[in-house]
Structures are given as C-alpha cells and as structure tokens.
Image (tube, grey):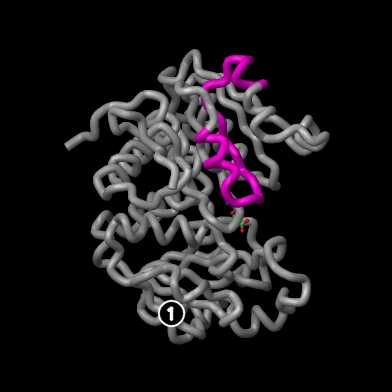
Amino acid sequence: MINQRRPDGSLRHLITLDGLPRAELEDLLARAQHFVCEPGEQPRANQSLAGITIGNLFTEPSTRTRVSFELAGRRLGAEVVNLEVQLSSRAKGETMLDTIYTLQALHFDMFIIRDPQAGVVAHVAENVAPHVSVLSAGEAHVSHPTQGLLDALTIRQRKGDRFERLTIAVVGDIRHSRVARSAYEVFRGLGVGDLRLVAPAAMMPDAGEFAGTHRFATPEEGLRDVDVVMMLRIQKERMEQAAIPDGDDYFARFGLTPARLAFAKPDAIVMHPQPMNRGVEIDSAVADGPQSVIRDQVRNGVAMRMAVLETIARPRPLRS
Ligand code: NCD
C-alpha cells in the first residue's frame, strides 16, 4: 500500500482512510466544522493556500465532488484549474502520468483525481515530484476518502462524537461502492459501536471484506433501532448488464420508504451521497423528509475538503 505520509509523518497524499488514527480523523473533523456555514451566510475563507496551484482531473462524471473541491481550493486562496480529461490528451492516448508531468512543469502543486480504474491514483502519487500531493476524489469501487470524512462530519453534527454509542446501517449496493468502503474505514477508525451492512446477496461484499460488521438480508431486520441509515445508489456502471436489477423490484424490496424507516430509531438520520434515484433506492417522502440530512452532506463537502487541503498543504501538529 502507498505511503501517504512525508518523512516527518505529516499527511502528504490522501488516497485512503485505511489506517488513519482516530486522533487524526477527529482533528480533520474539528477543522472542517470550523469551515461549515449555512447557505446564505458569507462562506468561510482564508488565504492559507495562496500561491498553490491545484489541478482537478476527473475521468468519471462528478457534480458535487468536483465543484466542492474547486470551491474549497478557491476559498483557501489557491488557484484551481479544472481539466476536462476526456477531451484533452488522455483521450489521444497520452498516459495519465504524461499529463501529470506536463502539469508539473506548469507549476501545479496538487492533483485531485477521480478515475474508474483501481490503482491509478496511487500510481500517480508514487511518481509525482516530492513537493506535489495527490488526493483521491473517488477511485473505482475502492475508495472515496473525502466522502467518508464528510459523512462522518454529518453524523457528528447530529449525533455527537461518541461514535462507539452509534448503530449505523449502510444499505444497498455495498459491493460496488467506494462510498461504503471509505465509510467503513472512517467508522472503524472512529470506533462506531455497531456497523451493519444491509443488501441483497448480489450486492453484499465478499466475506473477507468489511470485517467486524453485521450483515442483514432485509431492511426490516437491518434497520431495527439504528441511529443512522446510509443509502447507496446501484452502481450500474460497475455491473454486468444482466445483473442490474429492475428498479421497481428493487424499490419493493430495498427502497427506503417511510414505513421501512419506522424500523429505525425515531430520531434516526437518513443519508445518501447522491446522485439519488428516487423511487429506486429511496422514496422522495424520505429523501425530502425531516430525517434527511442529504443536503447537509453536500454543504459539509466544501468544509471537509477545505480541512483536507489545508491539512495537506499546511501541516501542523495535531491539537491535543
Ligand atoms: C458518489 C461517487 O461518485 O462515488 N457520488 C459522490 O461522490 N457524492 C456516489 C455514487 O456515484 O453513487
């Protein structure tokens, strides 16, 4: 596995949350909380990344992640360039590394990469110049570290930081989900008491993965008395055509309706990383209902990415 740290121990890249100690995760969440502001308020901003140039290289579609990384960089005073990778030289056969070396010659200091192929982000990180940092914005089905962090931040805002007291259910296409894998890593790191996987057999991860979680075949069993329900989109782009379930059938068995949500605690929160398929994995009455924190997740995305960028570009000792 790639070493994400500098020789002094500070975080240089962010490719995975696996192995990040609890104190470091908590420091990131606390820093992010400082940047959170409500829509309509003046956004928090500073100049801590002045002079730094960030390249956003996304070779898979993205709305929230790309825009929030861009805003996060700009609100910290960095220069941010969005590269339309599909349209540029990678489509002509230039490798990702050749593109990166070109951009390094143009004085880029950080690359934010989303790629459908596992291992590309780490490969870039292993080959960039020593002053350059690489951050994953979603790697295949493997990881999406800033999503995991913003999900933890959203839970902390509503449920407090005693993660060991919480029961969290992740529901849906866990097998193909990078969101679920990063959530698992951050929840394990923060000591979540009971982590449940709720999915049909074809969407359950292999037995060797997600150690220490409890598995359920139906939402009626898996949602009982949970504090947090985290819904996932069916990752059709990572499935064989024949394996993609019919939307109506899936909704009938796994869709989060008000009746199913009633199995959770009355004050349970409902999360979804988006994009959502209403009427497939979630009912609009739940997505737009009082227990939904889906828009908080979006708001928190900018704050969390500001905290990550600042932590990487301007390392400082953990607060004790
Ligand atoms: C997710 C992704 O791309 O992994 N979206 C996001 O970043 N918020 C989830 C998904 O596509 O289902």
Classify 10 Å Cα crowding around label 1: few (below 14), some (14-19), many (20 and above).
some
From the image, tell me which residue sits under label 1: 215
Q: Which residues are magenta?
A: 102-126
Tell me which image quadrant ligand 1 sits in.
Answer: bottom right
Q: Using the image as rendered, state which of residue 233 and residue 263 is in the foreground.
A: 233
* Residue at figure coordinates x 45%, y 20% from the top left: 49
Q: Using the image as rendered, state which of residue 130 and residue 239 is in the foreground.
A: 130
Element type at mark 1: strand
Can residue 267 be seen here? The reply is: no
- 28 vs 280, left or right, is left
Q: Using the image as rendered, state which of residue 146 and residue 119 is in the foreground.
A: 119
* Residue at figure coordinates x 28%, y 28% from the top left: 8
* Residue at figure coordinates x 44%, y 86% from the top left: 221
- The total number of labels drawn is 1
In this picture, is 55 found above or below 176?
above
Query: Per the image, is 115 magenta?
Result: yes
Residue 33: image location, x then y, percent = 35, 40
In this picture, is 86 found above or below 282?
above
* Residue 267 image-quadrant placement: bottom left
In this picture, is 207 found above or below 71?
below
Screen quadrant of the C terminus:
top left
Residue 308: image location, x then y, percent = 42, 36
